[in-house]
Image (cartoon, rainbow, N blue to C red):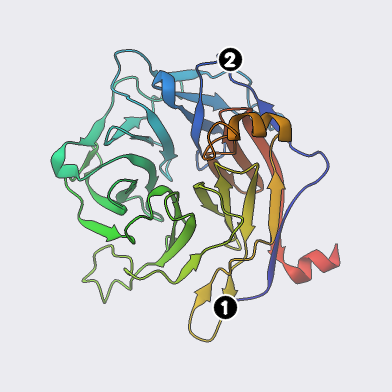
Amino acid sequence: MPSSHFEIDADPPFVQLIVPLDATERFEGVGLSSSGDILGVATSENDTVLLFRRKPDGQFEDRPYCTIGGPGSALAYPHDVAFSACGQLLAVAQRRGAVTVYERSAAENGYGPVPAFEISGPQSKLAFSDGVAFVPPDDDYLAACNFELATVSFYRRTSRYPIRFEATPEFELHLSSGDGPDGLAFSRDGKWLATANHGSQSICVFQRQNKLLSGGKLRYRRKPVSVIKDPQLRYPHSVAFTPHTNHLVVTNAGANYFCAYKPTAGYFKVDWPARPVLTKITNDDDAFMEINARNKMEGGPKGIAIHEDKLVVSCPEFGIKIYSFREGSDRDAAAR
């Protein structure tokens, strides 16, 4: 693996700020469509998902063009959102133990309002399901992390028209007891899976098994190839891979910053050492401390999503901030 770098552009400090229109809009998980044209955010306490469109100038509209859920809807404490690679599906993880899937409407470029499919019930083995993602590169599986069970559940798609997934997980990845995974992410090629473990304040990275060794089925090795136990991690909430260098970017619900970790290649494996190559403050310290003094697990950034050179971070206290970043080989950085 060639030496690589990752940096947040310092000027301007962030590209855009999207402020909640209502005090009840508590922004949690965020997602970006594969085209980068749609930004989704789960607003947990009022049971909605908000969608924002990107304008011709590259920024997103300040007001959502589509609202999913609300009182009496199928959503109950939505915590995370994920778009499929083709952009036709939007998955929503609900803390009540459900993953709801919506289809894109050709008429208005929105999703819903009626769910196309839902994975729920005792057979789903979902418990405090805080994170969700389609498994790249072909989106044939949905993955959800379960805080209470310390598992990641994988559901195979059985039909594209109409949309259908298996009701029970085809595969369950068991983390260490007490890890409490709050978020998950896959690398662009699906080779790596990372979990943000709120309970153990760590990050685990798992490698996908060779199909020849797994009988052609989707499997991830049960032992992580890397465990990040950085003292700077404070109740990690969400994690994302950068698209080209596989840096891991992690938000900390109990700290006023997000961190980035650089992959390194050894003789036998790839590792993500527990030394951040970047720590970025996201909010005013006084505003953070006011919340964190009451609850040490709150006040910091929650959701994270990455598309090409844009990084989106959400927080109940400030809303959504969009940053510009650069990644590449260290040779490229030296040439600038």
**Residue 47 place in picture, x, y as percent:** 39, 21
The mark tally for this picture is: 2
**Residue 231 place in picture, x, y as percent:** 59, 59
Instruction: Say which of 109 and 68 sits in front.
Output: 68
Q: Dot 1, crowdedness within 10 Å: few (<14), some or many (≥20)?
A: few
**Residue 134 place in picture, x, y as percent:** 37, 47
Left or right position of 116 against 18: left
- Residue type at tag 1: Ala
Which of the 4 image quadrants contains residue 108? top left
Q: Secondary structure at mark 2?
A: loop
Instruction: Say which of 173 and 66 sits in front.
Output: 173
On-image quarter of the C terminus:
bottom right
Left or right position of 142 against 324: left
The residue carrying mark 2 is 21
Please determine whether, in this image, residue 176 is positioned above or below residue 250.
Answer: below
First in sequence: mark 2 vs mark 1: 2
The residue carrying mark 1 is 265
Q: Dot 2, crowdedness within 10 Å: few (<14), some or many (≥20)?
A: few
- Residue type at tag 2: Leu
C-beta proximity under 8 Å, tags 2 and 1? no
Please determine whether, in this image, residue 233 is positioned above or below residue 12.
Answer: below
Residue shown at 58%/61% (left/top)? 230
